[in-house]
Image (tube, rainbow, N blue to C red):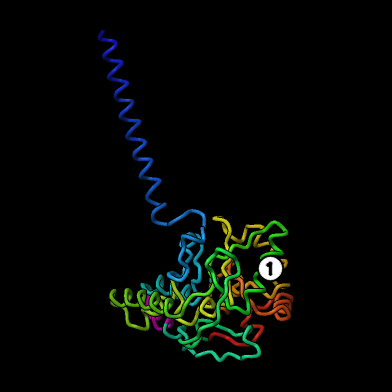
């Protein structure tokens, strides 16, 4: 009888412990899922227009984080060392210029932290992949579709992750970030620099023009996917270039983005690829 009671007691404890473990496990798994949305970069759940950073990639990849801002980050670290850091940061901060679009060569427009689109810029938009709400400039869409289908035939899926994004949306997100940094006691100029570390100013993002697509199909680093290899080999044949190469960040002022592909037309894409230059070098237009 006593033995039976002891057995029941042990059984009861085991059951309680198991239940507690289940509950802990459930909440531990649930929290990050709620925070980061979905683990796969499912296009339906991410609002690309609401944020500069694809949420799923925000931690792994500093999407759209400008190299200018990496400087700022370095200077942030250096600011405790001496006064020169902030002075340097002011110097490095670009004076924006409103970009002029050549109607004949619209596809070669350089949009960057320095060369910004006019606030009222609005391309005509179409959607390259049915059922996926990621528009591009209507003149670029057919080229993306062509590339998408060719890749598909080779077993690669170039899922659109982030295409065109409105300037007004970009502006409100950027201004939110700026005002947060100003609340922390930074000057407007400093707050702008710090904000640009996370989100490019309105008109400075190629996504505002609708000529670029962020292509993501897996959770792993896009650089290691067969899709990335395919793009490196074939994208130029459809007019697309890797806009922010690893070794050109000091020129583009944007950190390496293996997922960001920009339309420049077939002829120029092939030339750019063969030259090993980034768009700034190819056009001879620089950001500083
Ligand atoms: Zn992008």
Q: Looking at the picture, how far across and down is residue 18, in whole percent?
A: 35, 31
In this rendered view, identify the residue nearer to me: 269 or 181.
269
Which residue appears at 49% of the width and 71% of the height? 65
Q: Quadrant of residue 285?
A: bottom right
Q: Is residue 32 above or below residue 269?
A: above
Tag 1 secondary structure: helix
Which residue appears at 49% of the width and 60% of the height? 44
In this rendered view, identify the residue nearer to me: 46 or 190.
46
Residue 242 placement, left or right of 254: right
Q: Looking at the picture, how far across and down is residue 239, in whole percent?
A: 69, 75
Q: Is residue 1 above or below residue 145?
A: above
Q: Is residue 81 magenta?
A: no
Q: Is residue 49 above or below residue 251?
A: above
Q: Is residue 129 above or below residue 167?
A: above
Magenta segment boundaries in residue numbering? 82-89
**Ligand 1 shown in quarter:** bottom right
């Amino acid at each position: 009888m006593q033995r039976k009671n002891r057995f029941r007691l042990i059984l009861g404890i085991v059951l309680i412990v198991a239940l507690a473990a289940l509950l802990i496990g459930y909440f531990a798994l649930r929290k990050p899922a709620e925070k980061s949305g979905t683990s796969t970069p499912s296009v339906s759940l991410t609002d690309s227009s609401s944020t500069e950073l694809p949420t799923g990639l925000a931690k792994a990849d500093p999407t759209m984080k400008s190299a200018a801002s990496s400087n700022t980050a370095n200077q942030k670290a250096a600011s405790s060392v001496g006064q020169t850091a902030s002075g340097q940061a002011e110097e490095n901060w670009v004076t924006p210029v409103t970009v002029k679009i050549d109607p004949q060569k619209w596809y070669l427009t350089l949009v960057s932290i320095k060369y910004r689109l006019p606030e009222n810029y609005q391309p005509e938009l179409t959607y390259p992949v049915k059922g996926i709400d990621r528009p591009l400039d209507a003149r670029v869409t057919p080229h993306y579709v062509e590339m998408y289908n060719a890749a598909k035939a080779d077993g690669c899926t170039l899922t659109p992750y982030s295409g065109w994004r409105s300037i007004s949306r970009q502006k409100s997100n950027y201004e939110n970030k700026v005002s947060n940094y100003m609340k922390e006691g930074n000057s407007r100029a400093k707050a702008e620099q710090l904000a640009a570390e996370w989100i490019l100013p309105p008109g400075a993002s190629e996504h505002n023009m609708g000529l670029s697509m962020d292509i993501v199909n897996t959770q792993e680093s896009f650089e290691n996917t067969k899709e990335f290899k395919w793009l490196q080999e074939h994208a130029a044949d459809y007019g697309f270039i890797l806009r922010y190469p690893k070794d050109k960040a000091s020129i583009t002022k944007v950190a390496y983005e293996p997922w960001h592909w920009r339309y420049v037309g077939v002829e120029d894409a092939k030339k750019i690829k063969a030259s090993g230059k980034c768009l700034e070098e190819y056009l001879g237009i620089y950001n500083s």
